[in-house]
Image (spheres, rainbow, N blue to C red):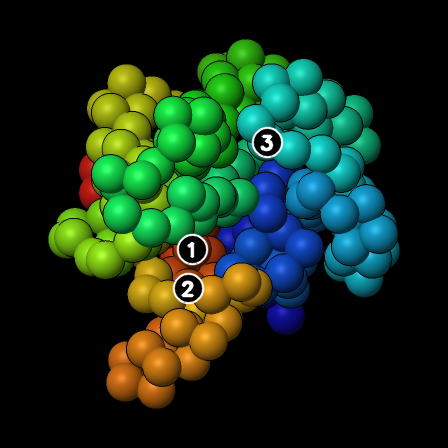
Amino acid sequence: MTSRYGLEGRAAIVTGASRGIGRAVAEALAGAGARVCVSARDPDAVRRVAGELGGVGLAGSVADPAHLRELTELGLSALGRIDIVVNNAAANQPYGPLMDAAPDRWREAFTVNVEAPLRLVQCAWRAWMREHGGAVVNICTEGAAHVGPNVGAYGTSKAALLHLAQQLAGELAPKVRVNSVSPGLVRAGPLDALADRLIARAQPSNERTDDTALLLLRSTAVRGRGAV
Protein backbone atom coordinates (compact mmCIF):
# COMPACT_ATOMS: atom_id res chain seq x y z
CA MET A 1 0.00 0.00 0.00
CA THR A 2 1.32 3.46 -0.87
CA SER A 3 2.13 5.69 2.11
CA ARG A 4 0.11 8.86 2.51
CA TYR A 5 3.35 10.80 2.87
CA GLY A 6 4.66 10.14 -0.64
CA LEU A 7 8.15 9.26 0.58
CA GLU A 8 8.66 5.94 -1.18
CA GLY A 9 12.13 5.72 -2.67
CA ARG A 10 13.33 8.93 -1.05
CA ALA A 11 16.60 9.02 0.88
CA ALA A 12 16.97 10.74 4.25
CA ILE A 13 19.77 11.71 6.61
CA VAL A 14 18.75 11.89 10.27
CA THR A 15 21.13 13.09 12.99
CA GLY A 16 20.82 12.17 16.64
CA ALA A 17 18.98 9.06 15.50
CA SER A 18 20.04 6.54 18.15
CA ARG A 19 17.17 7.32 20.53
CA GLY A 20 14.29 9.62 21.36
CA ILE A 21 12.85 11.89 18.69
CA GLY A 22 15.63 11.18 16.19
CA ARG A 23 15.08 7.45 16.28
CA ALA A 24 11.31 7.89 16.11
CA VAL A 25 11.64 10.10 13.01
CA ALA A 26 14.05 7.65 11.36
CA GLU A 27 11.68 4.76 12.07
CA ALA A 28 8.74 6.72 10.70
CA LEU A 29 10.65 7.62 7.54
CA ALA A 30 11.60 3.99 6.96
CA GLY A 31 8.03 2.95 7.64
CA ALA A 32 6.85 5.44 5.03
CA GLY A 33 9.11 3.92 2.39
CA ALA A 34 12.18 6.15 2.64
CA ARG A 35 15.72 4.84 2.95
CA VAL A 36 17.65 6.24 5.86
CA CYS A 37 21.21 7.19 6.74
CA VAL A 38 21.49 7.72 10.50
CA SER A 39 24.05 9.42 12.70
CA ALA A 40 24.77 9.54 16.43
CA ARG A 41 27.81 9.46 18.68
CA ASP A 42 27.43 5.87 19.92
CA PRO A 43 28.81 3.43 17.29
CA ASP A 44 26.92 0.42 18.68
CA ALA A 45 23.63 2.32 18.71
CA VAL A 46 24.19 3.57 15.17
CA ARG A 47 24.85 0.05 13.90
CA ARG A 48 21.79 -1.26 15.69
CA VAL A 49 19.40 1.41 14.42
CA ALA A 50 20.75 1.27 10.86
CA GLY A 51 20.42 -2.52 10.83
CA GLU A 52 16.89 -2.49 12.23
CA LEU A 53 15.77 0.07 9.66
CA GLY A 54 17.59 -1.47 6.71
CA GLY A 55 19.65 1.66 6.26
CA VAL A 56 23.21 2.83 6.77
CA GLY A 57 24.84 4.79 9.55
CA LEU A 58 27.93 6.66 10.63
CA ALA A 59 28.96 7.33 14.21
CA GLY A 60 30.43 10.70 15.08
CA SER A 61 29.75 14.17 16.43
CA VAL A 62 27.87 16.73 14.38
CA ALA A 63 30.19 19.32 15.93
CA ASP A 64 32.90 17.95 13.64
CA PRO A 65 32.55 19.35 10.09
CA ALA A 66 34.46 16.35 8.73
CA HIS A 67 31.79 14.02 10.15
CA LEU A 68 29.08 15.96 8.35
CA ARG A 69 30.93 15.73 5.06
CA GLU A 70 31.50 12.00 5.53
CA LEU A 71 27.85 11.49 6.51
CA THR A 72 26.73 13.23 3.32
CA GLU A 73 29.15 11.20 1.22
CA LEU A 74 27.90 7.97 2.82
CA GLY A 75 24.27 8.88 2.23
CA LEU A 76 24.87 9.73 -1.40
CA SER A 77 27.05 6.70 -2.16
CA ALA A 78 24.89 4.16 -0.31
CA LEU A 79 21.44 5.55 -1.12
CA GLY A 80 22.11 7.25 -4.44
CA ARG A 81 20.42 10.51 -3.48
CA ILE A 82 19.72 12.85 -0.54
CA ASP A 83 16.16 14.12 -0.59
CA ILE A 84 15.68 14.76 3.12
CA VAL A 85 17.73 16.14 6.00
CA VAL A 86 16.44 15.99 9.58
CA ASN A 87 18.62 17.98 11.97
CA ASN A 88 17.80 16.45 15.33
CA ALA A 89 21.14 16.11 17.17
CA ALA A 90 21.36 18.64 19.98
CA ALA A 91 23.32 19.66 23.07
CA ASN A 92 21.45 20.66 26.22
CA GLN A 93 24.54 21.87 28.06
CA PRO A 94 25.50 24.10 29.78
CA TYR A 95 22.58 23.54 32.15
CA GLY A 96 22.22 26.26 34.74
CA PRO A 97 22.13 30.05 35.08
CA LEU A 98 23.71 31.93 32.21
CA MET A 99 25.88 33.85 34.67
CA ASP A 100 27.63 30.54 35.37
CA ALA A 101 27.93 29.44 31.73
CA ALA A 102 31.55 28.82 30.73
CA PRO A 103 32.51 30.28 27.33
CA ASP A 104 33.55 26.93 25.85
CA ARG A 105 30.30 25.22 26.88
CA TRP A 106 28.29 28.14 25.46
CA ARG A 107 30.13 27.83 22.14
CA GLU A 108 29.54 24.09 22.14
CA ALA A 109 25.78 24.62 22.41
CA PHE A 110 25.80 26.87 19.36
CA THR A 111 28.19 24.63 17.44
CA VAL A 112 25.93 21.61 17.85
CA ASN A 113 22.52 23.28 17.80
CA VAL A 114 23.02 25.96 15.12
CA GLU A 115 26.24 25.62 13.15
CA ALA A 116 26.01 21.85 12.59
CA PRO A 117 22.53 22.00 11.03
CA LEU A 118 23.73 24.73 8.68
CA ARG A 119 26.84 22.77 7.70
CA LEU A 120 24.86 19.60 7.01
CA VAL A 121 22.36 21.46 4.85
CA GLN A 122 25.28 23.02 2.98
CA CYS A 123 26.73 19.56 2.36
CA ALA A 124 23.40 18.15 1.18
CA TRP A 125 22.77 21.21 -1.01
CA ARG A 126 26.11 20.91 -2.76
CA ALA A 127 25.91 17.13 -3.14
CA TRP A 128 22.30 16.77 -4.32
CA MET A 129 19.66 19.32 -3.38
CA ARG A 130 20.90 22.27 -5.43
CA GLU A 131 20.11 20.34 -8.61
CA HIS A 132 17.35 17.97 -7.51
CA GLY A 133 15.60 19.75 -4.64
CA GLY A 134 14.61 18.31 -1.30
CA ALA A 135 13.29 19.03 2.17
CA VAL A 136 14.83 19.92 5.52
CA VAL A 137 13.31 19.73 8.98
CA ASN A 138 15.06 21.16 12.02
CA ILE A 139 13.93 19.74 15.35
CA CYS A 140 13.69 22.84 17.53
CA THR A 141 11.85 23.25 20.87
CA GLU A 142 8.86 25.08 22.20
CA GLY A 143 11.31 26.63 24.68
CA ALA A 144 12.77 28.73 21.87
CA ALA A 145 9.85 31.11 22.25
CA HIS A 146 10.09 31.79 25.99
CA VAL A 147 12.50 31.86 28.91
CA GLY A 148 13.00 29.15 31.49
CA PRO A 149 15.25 28.42 34.46
CA ASN A 150 18.62 26.77 33.75
CA VAL A 151 18.03 26.23 30.01
CA GLY A 152 19.17 29.63 28.75
CA ALA A 153 21.95 28.32 26.51
CA TYR A 154 19.76 25.60 25.04
CA GLY A 155 16.77 27.88 24.49
CA THR A 156 18.86 30.69 23.01
CA SER A 157 20.64 28.37 20.60
CA LYS A 158 17.36 26.77 19.56
CA ALA A 159 15.86 30.22 18.96
CA ALA A 160 18.78 30.82 16.61
CA LEU A 161 18.04 27.47 14.93
CA LEU A 162 14.44 28.55 14.44
CA HIS A 163 15.57 31.72 12.71
CA LEU A 164 18.07 29.73 10.67
CA ALA A 165 15.21 27.63 9.33
CA GLN A 166 13.32 30.76 8.35
CA GLN A 167 16.38 32.22 6.63
CA LEU A 168 17.13 28.99 4.76
CA ALA A 169 13.51 28.67 3.72
CA GLY A 170 13.78 32.02 2.00
CA GLU A 171 17.20 31.43 0.47
CA LEU A 172 16.71 27.87 -0.81
CA ALA A 173 13.18 28.17 -2.18
CA PRO A 174 11.72 26.88 -4.39
CA LYS A 175 14.16 23.97 -4.75
CA VAL A 176 14.33 23.05 -1.07
CA ARG A 177 11.60 23.32 1.56
CA VAL A 178 12.80 24.13 5.08
CA ASN A 179 10.67 23.83 8.20
CA SER A 180 11.04 23.47 11.95
CA VAL A 181 9.18 21.30 14.43
CA SER A 182 9.10 22.54 18.02
CA PRO A 183 8.05 19.74 20.39
CA GLY A 184 7.74 19.98 24.14
CA LEU A 185 9.97 18.03 26.50
CA VAL A 186 10.08 14.27 25.89
CA ARG A 187 11.82 11.37 27.58
CA ALA A 188 15.15 11.02 25.79
CA GLY A 189 18.02 10.96 28.25
CA PRO A 190 19.60 13.01 31.04
CA LEU A 191 16.53 15.16 31.68
CA ASP A 192 14.13 12.22 32.05
CA ALA A 193 13.16 13.11 35.62
CA LEU A 194 12.23 16.65 34.61
CA ALA A 195 10.52 15.30 31.51
CA ASP A 196 8.40 12.97 33.63
CA ARG A 197 7.02 15.88 35.63
CA LEU A 198 6.26 18.05 32.61
CA ILE A 199 4.96 15.25 30.40
CA ALA A 200 2.44 14.34 33.06
CA ARG A 201 0.84 17.71 32.38
CA ALA A 202 1.40 18.30 28.67
CA GLN A 203 1.76 14.78 27.22
CA PRO A 204 4.12 15.54 24.30
CA SER A 205 5.30 12.44 22.47
CA ASN A 206 7.87 11.21 19.98
CA GLU A 207 5.01 9.84 17.91
CA ARG A 208 3.37 13.23 17.56
CA THR A 209 6.70 14.79 16.58
CA ASP A 210 7.60 12.17 13.98
CA ASP A 211 4.18 12.41 12.35
CA THR A 212 4.49 16.19 12.08
CA ALA A 213 7.97 15.82 10.60
CA LEU A 214 6.70 13.38 7.96
CA LEU A 215 3.88 15.70 6.98
CA LEU A 216 6.44 18.48 6.40
CA LEU A 217 8.75 16.18 4.45
CA ARG A 218 6.19 14.79 2.03
CA SER A 219 6.55 15.83 -1.57
CA THR A 220 3.38 17.95 -1.54
CA ALA A 221 4.25 19.93 1.58
CA VAL A 222 4.43 23.71 1.35
CA ARG A 223 7.58 25.70 1.86
CA GLY A 224 7.74 26.77 5.49
CA ARG A 225 9.19 29.70 7.35
CA GLY A 226 8.59 28.84 10.95
CA ALA A 227 7.82 26.24 13.60
CA VAL A 228 5.08 23.69 14.08
Measured Cα–Cα span from mark 3 to mark 2: 21 Å
Asked if 141 appears above or below 160 in the picture, the reply is below
The residue pinned by badge 2 equals 209
**Amino acid type of the residue that numbered disc 1 sits on in the rendered structure:** Ala
Rendered-image quadrant of the C terminus: bottom left
- The image shows residue 154 at horizontal and vertical percentages of 34, 45
Query: Which one is nearer the viewer's eye here, 89 or 191?
Result: 191
The residue pinned by badge 3 equals 62
| Secondary structure of the residue carrying numbered label 1 | helix
| Secondary structure of the residue carrying numbered label 3 | loop
Measured Cα–Cα span from mark 2 to mark 1: 6 Å
- The image shows residue 65 at horizontal and vertical percentages of 60, 18
Measured Cα–Cα span from mark 3 to mark 1: 20 Å
**Amino acid type of the residue that numbered disc 3 sits on in the rendered structure:** Val
Q: Residue at x 42, y 55 (%)?
A: 213
41 to the left or right of 200: right
Q: Quadrant of residue 94?
A: top left
Query: Which one is nearer the viewer's eye here, 127 or 141?
Result: 141
| Secondary structure of the residue carrying numbered label 2 | helix
Query: Which one is nearer the viewer's eye here, 101 or 152?
Result: 101
- Specify the farthest residue to the bottom: 200
Contact between marks 2 and 1 (CB within 8 A): the answer is: yes
Q: Residue at x 32, y 77 (%)?
A: 198
30 to the left or right of 216: right
**Amino acid type of the residue that numbered disc 2 sits on in the rendered structure:** Thr
Asked if 191 appears above or below 131 in the picture, the reply is below
Residue 211 appears in view? no
Mark number, residue 81: none
222 to the left or right of 186: left
The residue pinned by badge 1 equals 213
Residue 123 appears in view? yes
